[in-house]
Amino acid sequence: MTATPQLADLRQAFERRFGARPRVFRAPGRTNLIGEHTDYNDGLVMPVAIDRATWVACAPRPGATLRVFSEHFSEMVAFDLGEASPAPRRHWSDYVRGVALELGRAGIRGGADLLVRGDVPLGAGVSSSASLEVAVALALASLAARDLPRLELAQLCQRAENDFVGARCGIMDQFVACFGRAGHAVFLDCRTLEHAALPLPENVRLVLCNTMVRHEIAAGEYN
């Protein structure tokens, strides 16, 4: 990964907070061209990864504690990965913990320190949650020296959001965070998970407008 000024600054921020040299992972947000609300296993969608993303810097730590610092919320959260019956808190950290639990079921576990930085607007309908989930999953799998197939990664992150966070989202958001490519849309048949990268015309630009209307899927009418 190229050491851009932003990447170098993130690494320095991690080192100041946790005293270790991190690895850094990134996952994008998304917008959708075709197929809103048809992605729960029964429809066709065509999303596009956007140029806003979540970055996760990470390093291993001894024991079974996961510590996560969010720059957006200026908050540190820690949880014991060995807790018998963890419950969601209706808190941003549920997305991280849900992913860690799903990875644990896949045999991927171990203490870690994470620092989260992102510029995907929260609650704006551009999948900040899936961006966070995928970046965290990439980070924790890497620390365990596991290279998960991208499809397995997307499905794991969807389960984290469905089963722990409590949002009955389809696979689209996590899928495009894993398979999105610059200059392309992603065709996805949610029934079969058949997919293809579709080049966008070079003379076309997508413009997203943030209306500042916030939503929370798990607490609203979406479910």
Image (cartoon, rainbow, N blue to C red):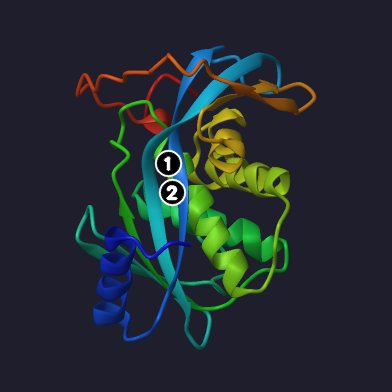
Q: Nearer the viewer, residue 47 or 215?
A: 47
Left or right? Give the position of 120 relative to 133: left
| Residue type indicated by callout 2 | Leu
Q: Give residue 176's position: percent from left, percent from top.
A: 57, 34
Residue 4, label in figure: none
Q: Give residue 174's position: percent from left, percent from top.
A: 56, 38
Residue under the point 41% across and 60% down: 56
Task: Measure how far apart labels 2 and 1 are at the Cα level.
Answer: 5 Å
Residue 88 seen in the figure: no
Residue 129, label in figure: 1
Residue 148 seen in the figure: yes
Left or right? Give the position of 199 relative to 50: right
On the image, which quarter does residue 77 sit in? bottom left
Residue under the point 76% across and 21% down: 191
Q: Give residue 134's position: percent from left, percent from top.
A: 53, 49
- Binning the other alpha carbons within 10 Å of mark 2 as few (below 14), some (14 to 19) or many (20 upward) gives many
On the image, which quarter does residue 172 sit in? top right
Residue under the point 47% across and 47% down: 27
Residue under the point 68% across and 23% down: 188
Mark 1 secondary-structure assignment: helix
Left or right? Give the position of 165 relative to 89: right
Is the residue 219 above or below the residue 91 in the image?
Answer: above
| Residue type indicated by callout 1 | Ser
Disc 2, disc 1: CB below 8 Å?
yes
Mark 2 secondary-structure assignment: helix
- Binning the other alpha carbons within 10 Å of mark 1 as few (below 14), some (14 to 19) or many (20 upward) gives many
Is the residue 77 above or below the residue 19 in the image?
Answer: above
Is the residue 139 above or below the residue 20 in the image?
Answer: above
Residue 132, label in figure: 2
Is the residue 22 above or below the residue 29 in the image?
Answer: below
